[in-house]
């Protein structure tokens, strides 16, 4: 009976993780460049800690990881010269005011007062030589990521990739960060395809995600009922043993 309670508790813990993950995916269905997070069952303790949001149940000897889905989102034309999308592998590198680096597929960029290319929330977009100034005229970006203003080169936008990009940590707002010793490696210009005037949409399938979330909620409810039933049986057993003694 106690084993059944432990199994139900562990199952509910996993289903709650699935629900939370799907809810976050749905909340970002309109976030440019967003990579949905998927859940994966881990059958050994050694495989559990790899991804973000790892959950491990010692009693069941099972775990659940959360990993990024690397499938590309749809490319949508915007007509905005500052909007960029990567067609293929890689991520843009952006820095906050403290110098922390994040990675994103969301290329909805703009320009700050200093004329630098920035994200919609003010992070500096990094070129291979640092921030890129795009003020002073017509901006053009070729497929290798080279940015020109009135035909004059201003720098190449930095596109990086990782050995295991599925293990990047989702920070929200389309931002990703590394974990452990994973390092960013610049993608060679000949392997980069940057598209100007486009944005990559989220790769979340809202219908499928909603169905998965409903399924997880029902499984959670079943686990709760199992725990409730076994708790009642356990209580009756304890009371019966008390009367017998």
Image: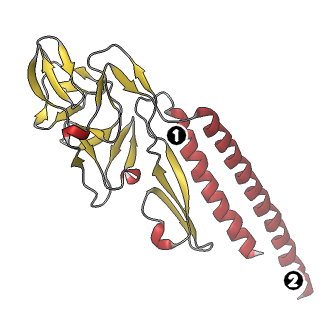
Residue denoted by label 2: 241
Residue depicted at 39% across the width and 36% down the height = 174
Query: Relative to the observer, which residue lies in front, 116 or 105?
Result: 105
Query: Relative to the observer, which residue lies in front, 8 or 198?
Result: 198
Measured in 3D between alpha carbons, the distance from the residue under mark 1 to the one under mark 2, in whole angstroms, is 47 Å
Q: Which image quadrant: the C terminus?
A: bottom right
Residue depicted at 74% across the width and 56% down the height = 224
Q: In the picture, residue 205 is in which quadrant?
A: top right
Q: In the picture, residue 120 is in which quadrant?
A: top left
Residue that lies at the very extreme toward the front in this rendered image = 190
Q: Which image quadrant: the N terminus?
A: bottom right
Residue denoted by label 1: 24
Query: Relative to the observer, which residue lies in front, 4 or 244?
Result: 4
Could one spot residue 42 in this view of the protein? yes
In the image, residue 78 lies at what x, y percent? Answer: 37, 16
In the image, residue 16 lies at what x, y percent? Answer: 61, 52
* Mark 2 secondary-structure assignment: helix
In the image, residue 58 lies at what x, y percent? Answer: 57, 73
């Amino acid at each position: 009976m106690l084993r059944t309670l432990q199994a139900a508790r562990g199952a509910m813990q996993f289903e709650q993780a699935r629900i939370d993950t799907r809810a976050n995916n749905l909340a970002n269905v309109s976030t440019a460049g967003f990579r949905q997070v998927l859940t994966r069952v881990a059958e050994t303790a050694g495989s559990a800690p790899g991804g973000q949001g790892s959950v491990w149940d010692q009693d069941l000897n099972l775990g659940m990881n959360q990993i990024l889905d690397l499938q590309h989102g749809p490319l949508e034309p915007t007509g905005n010269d500052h909007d960029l999308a990567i067609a293929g592998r890689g991520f843009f590198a952006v820095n906050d005011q403290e110098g922390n680096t994040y990675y994103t597929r969301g290329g909805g960029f703009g320009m700050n007062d200093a004329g630098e290319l920035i994200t919609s929330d003010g992070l500096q977009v990094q070129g291979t030589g640092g921030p890129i100034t795009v003020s002073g005229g017509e901006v053009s970006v070729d497929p290798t990521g080279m940015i020109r203003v009135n035909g004059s080169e201003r720098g190449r936008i930095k596109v990086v990739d990782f050995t295991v990009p599925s293990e990047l940590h989702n920070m929200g707002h389309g931002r990703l960060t590394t974990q452990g010793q994973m390092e960013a490696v610049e993608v060679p210009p000949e392997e980069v395809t940057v598209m100007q005037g486009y944005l990559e949409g989220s790769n979340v399938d809202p219908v499928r995600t909603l169905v998965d979330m409903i399924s997880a909620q029902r499984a959670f409810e079943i686990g709760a009922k199992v725990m409730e039933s076994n708790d009642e049986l356990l209580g009756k057993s304890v009371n019966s043993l008390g009367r017998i003694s």
